[in-house]
Structures are given as structure tokens and as C-alpha cells.
Image (cartoon, helix red, strand yellow):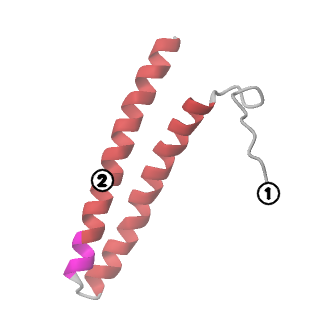
Amino acid sequence: MTTKSVEGGVVTGTPDKNYNLIWFTEACLDNALRLDTYIEDARRSKDTDLEDLFVRAQANSVQGAEEAKALLRSRLDDKV
């Protein structure tokens, strides 16, 4: 069994909660880009059910990224 250690910002200089927020933002944006490929694949195969699913998922990823960016922005503004 492996044990996960908590870094806490000692090594990176970034507390875990902020690092997690940065990671989440990047993951949402990456997912939105990846889903663009999936949407095009579904369109080419004329699978509207799959296209609709991927379009909704992409919108959710974009929304998640926007919310995370706003939260990150407010936290960074508090530090300045």
C-alpha cells in the first residue's frame, strides 16, 4: 500500500488548494478542446445523440473553467 503525502506548498510554493484550482481550470479547458474533436467525429458519422451529449459536456467544461478562473482571479487579487 502506498501513502500519499500532502505537499502543502513547501516544495512548490503553491498551497494545495490553489494548485488544485489551477489544475481543475486546466483540466476543464483541456476537456473542452478534446470534446471539440469528439463533436466533429460525431457530426461526421451523423450521430446526433452523441453530438448533443458532447456539446453539452463541452459547455459544462467551459462553464467549469470560467467559474474556476473567476475564483482563481479573486484569490490572486487578494494576494496583491
Which percent across, then down, holds residue 3? Answer: 77, 48
Q: Nearer the viewer, residue 17 or 59?
A: 17
Labels 2, 1: front one:
1
Q: Is residue 50 magenta?
A: yes
> Which of the 4 image quadrants contains residue 44?
bottom left
Residue at 36%, 66% (x, y): give it: 36
Note whether 54 is above or below 46 in the view shown: above
Q: Position of residue 25 (x, y in %)?
A: 46, 43
Q: Which residue was labeled with disc 2? A: 60
Q: Which residues are magenta?
A: 48-52
Instruction: Tell whether position 30 is magenta.
Output: no
* In this picture, residue 13 sits left or right of residue 26: right
Amino acid found under the numbered disc labelled 1: Met
**In the figure, 74 relative to 17: above or below?**
above
10 Å neighbourhood of mark 1: few (<14), some, or many (≥20)?
Answer: few
Q: Position of residue 58 (x, y in %)?
A: 32, 59
Going by the numbered disc 2, the residue's amino acid type is: Asn
- Give x and y (percent) for residue 7: 73, 33
Tag 1 residue: 1
> Tag count in the figure?
2
Locate residue 71: give its quadrant. top left
**Point 63% across, 27% down: residue:** 15
What secondary structure predominates along the stretch shown in magenta? helix
Residue at the (78%, 30%) spot, across then down: 11
Marks 2 and 1 sit apart, C-alpha to C-alpha, by 35 Å
Q: Quadrant of residue 18?
A: top right
User: Is residue 10 rendered to the left or right of residue 79?
Assistant: right
